[in-house]
Image: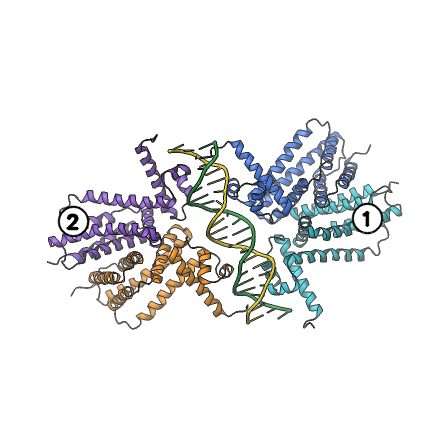
Chain colours: A purple, B orange, C blue, D cyan, E green, F yellow
Amino acid sequence: MPKVSEQYKEEKRNAILESALRCFGQKGYQATIIDDIVADSKISKGAIYNYFASKEEIYLQLLQKRSDEFFTDAEQRFTDLPNAMSKVRFLFERFRKQVLTEQNKQATRVYIEFWLYSSRQEDLRNVMEQRYEQFISYIKSIIEEGQKTGEFKQDLDSTQMSQIFWAMRDGSGLHYSFLGDQKKYEQTWKVLEELFVQYISERP
Amino acid sequence: MPKVSEQYKEEKRNAILESALRCFGQKGYQATIIDDIVADSKISKGAIYNYFASKEEIYLQLLQKRSDEFFTDAEQRFTDLPNAMSKVRFLFERFRKQVLTEQNKQATRVYIEFWLYSSRQEDLRNVMEQRYEQFISYIKSIIEEGQKTGEFKQDLDSTQMSQIFWAMRDGSGLHYSFLGDQKKYEQTWKVLEELFVQYISERP
Amino acid sequence: MPKVSEQYKEEKRNAILESALRCFGQKGYQATIIDDIVADSKISKGAIYNYFASKEEIYLQLLQKRSDEFFTDAEQRFTDLPNAMSKVRFLFERFRKQVLTEQNKQATRVYIEFWLYSSRQEDLRNVMEQRYEQFISYIKSIIEEGQKTGEFKQDLDSTQMSQIFWAMRDGSGLHYSFLGDQKKYEQTWKVLEELFVQYISERP
Amino acid sequence: MPKVSEQYKEEKRNAILESALRCFGQKGYQATIIDDIVADSKISKGAIYNYFASKEEIYLQLLQKRSDEFFTDAEQRFTDLPNAMSKVRFLFERFRKQVLTEQNKQATRVYIEFWLYSSRQEDLRNVMEQRYEQFISYIKSIIEEGQKTGEFKQDLDSTQMSQIFWAMRDGSGLHYSFLGDQKKYEQTWKVLEELFVQYISERP
DNA sequence: TATGAATGAGATTTCATTCAT
DNA sequence: CATGAATGAAATCTCATTCAT
């Protein structure tokens, strides 16, 4: 029987993950040492290992948590959007309006780094493939919804359009996590939106 | 063995760089240890350090060499293309036709990893900024050429379109270096091409 | 084992320094490898680096500690000596009575090696200059005391006499750390004492 | 039958030794790498190993050469000195007048470093003991000459006085190779001379 | 003989993980 | 549960020496 509450444990886990995100974002996964997380979180090394089995597990859970959050959040926001197009537009707006804080840039880097990392670890390919699949089907279903309602062209490959969306998002995320120019970032997303929407829209 | 020709040394350097590319591609920059390069190249550790001052320098020179090659190659191929649109189409074709060999996927990963790496190393930001600038102005000038000839819309921001091109390229590069499905890769590039060309083209 | 007392840590530090002194004395600073200290102290490599940032820092702190000890010790012993001459005699006696144990010979070598080492390291010159200054002024003040009381000649340059004392000490230290003949060592110090005392004494 | 003259080889050997002295003086024996000597002497690494079997051998021969030079030189200069006292005075003058050039300071450091080095290498103790013996007997014989002629006190231990001379010389050499103040150096030697001469002289 | 590229054992330092307290 | 000192395998880089040319 545990001496501390579940909630206490959850908070500690989260504190560790938040510190880890900062550290991984700042220095990269490999370059981050456990002592960085100790210093940032003020939680002792031993305690960290009580909550996570290894540095890699922290990394994995961090990614899991973030994509869970994305979907939870996205789900909520979509409830009262009337049609597919407004959902697409909402998505672009969402990324466009993201502020290029150090934190956000770091989170992007962590996320992209994880692509590379998992490309190379046989045992992580699965994890990553599933996550990718989730992201893909998310937009895919919006596209298909739009096709059903006649908002979007009938002959689009919905999977492909979804892939393209995420490729654009990751490509510009990568560049702007480096460049960090907020204004240009927003303009770029404006153009991406036009580009994308123009392409999928059924012409009158 | 001393007093070897410049050519001999050049070959050795290249052999090391090629091994390094393989290793960095397979395991990532940080995870690659010098002994991996030793094993792959069959060149002794000491010899490697005769040619490069550090592991980081190998990394830098590798990137330098690859982007040099890109521009040299691109320059040559463009000589007999008649107009801006054919150049743009050619560029898309070029990336579309790239074969997703292990080598190419690795090269892409190394390249993207370098973005992350240089984001974090103050002294590399410059190197990377310049390289990015080079890539940007390369397409920017094609866009502007097309605007002069009336092939492309007049109100495009050429820099932005160039950024978008490279964002798409890096985003899809990242994903397909992981997914590795050649057929889908080509289809994606076909759609990207339509998307992009449609957007920049002057309507009749 | 954590949350150990300050005393525990202090003891560990001292154990490392003592081992280092033995090793540096036996093989010299440069020739001593960390594994020598590990073997001698039975403290793991990692633990040593928990206490000292580098091999050089061990060296520095070792020297610091030894000269601190000299002054602390010297201060105490002088408290009840009635005049300058007895202090000078006491100093000579102190060095004369030093036993040429392996440990003492090694300590002398380490000390002299440090002169050479710091001569060559711009950033250590300061450290060494200060230490030298401390040793010089220590005897200088005794000489001046004797001049005030009329025990010693008035026209001595007290700094110079102090320099000469330490030159004699280091020169004979160097030689006897090599020769190691206790009896001759004592006789030499007897003569040095006569030489020195005769020179500084005010003739009646 | 060799293809080059003995003289050529001798010159090469000397060039290497001179470079080695500079390098060992500047950086110390251990810290000097063969490439330093290559750079300084502009003689190739292979060639150096044609003339000397190892870095240590260069060190040894360097010391041998320097002490040979000392004795050869000393012998010559003494030929027309009339008595023991003038020889003693000449010796002090010789050291006093030495200019504290970088080269001389370096040579002193190399020499002292060699004391330490040989203290620790069983196989070098012999070499060093013999060299020491040579230096000792050199002054010892002058003292004894002076005792015979009645210039010096009869009850001096000539060996000991010689030891003291060299201890003073090495001690002040060590310090001034670090301090490098020419004027003070000369004053110190003036006092050392008085100290020493006063002590050994027969009182009228 | 001269050259200098190649070798690889070995040195310093790091850091994920463990575990005694 | 928390702590943080201890561990030691492993990584980077060095450099005396060799030897093919």
In the rendered image, residue C111, in percent from the top left (x then y), is placed at 64, 43
Element under label 2? helix
Chain on which label 2 sits: A
Q: Can you say which quadrant of the picture contains the N terminus of chain A?
A: top left
In the rendered image, residue D142, in percent from the top left (x then y), is placed at 83, 49
Chain on which label 1 sits: D
Q: Is residue C153 above or below residue B27?
A: above
Which residue matches tag 2? A86
Element under label 1? helix
In the rendered image, residue B51, in percent from the top left (x then y), is placed at 49, 62
In terms of depth relative to the viewer, which is nearer, C7 or B125?
C7
Q: How many marks?
A: 2
Q: Can you say which quadrant of the picture contains the C terminus of chain A?
A: bottom left
Q: Is residue E9 above or below residue C180?
A: below
In terms of depth relative to the viewer, which is nearer, C185 or C77?
C185
Amino acid found under the numbered disc labelled 2: Ser
Residue D140 numbered mark, or none: 1
| Mark-to-mark CA distance, 1 and 2 | 106 Å
In the rendered image, residue B203, in percent from the top left (x then y), is placed at 17, 64
Amino acid found under the numbered disc labelled 1: Lys
A157 lies left or right of B12: left
Q: Is residue A47 above or below residue A25?
A: above
Question: Can residue C1 be seen by looking at this rendering?
Answer: no
Tell me what residue is drawn at x 47 percent, y 62 percent.
B42
Quarter-of-image position of residue C10: top right
In terms of depth relative to the viewer, which is nearer, C77 or A180?
C77
Q: Residues within 10 Å of mark 2 (few under 14, many from 20)?
A: some
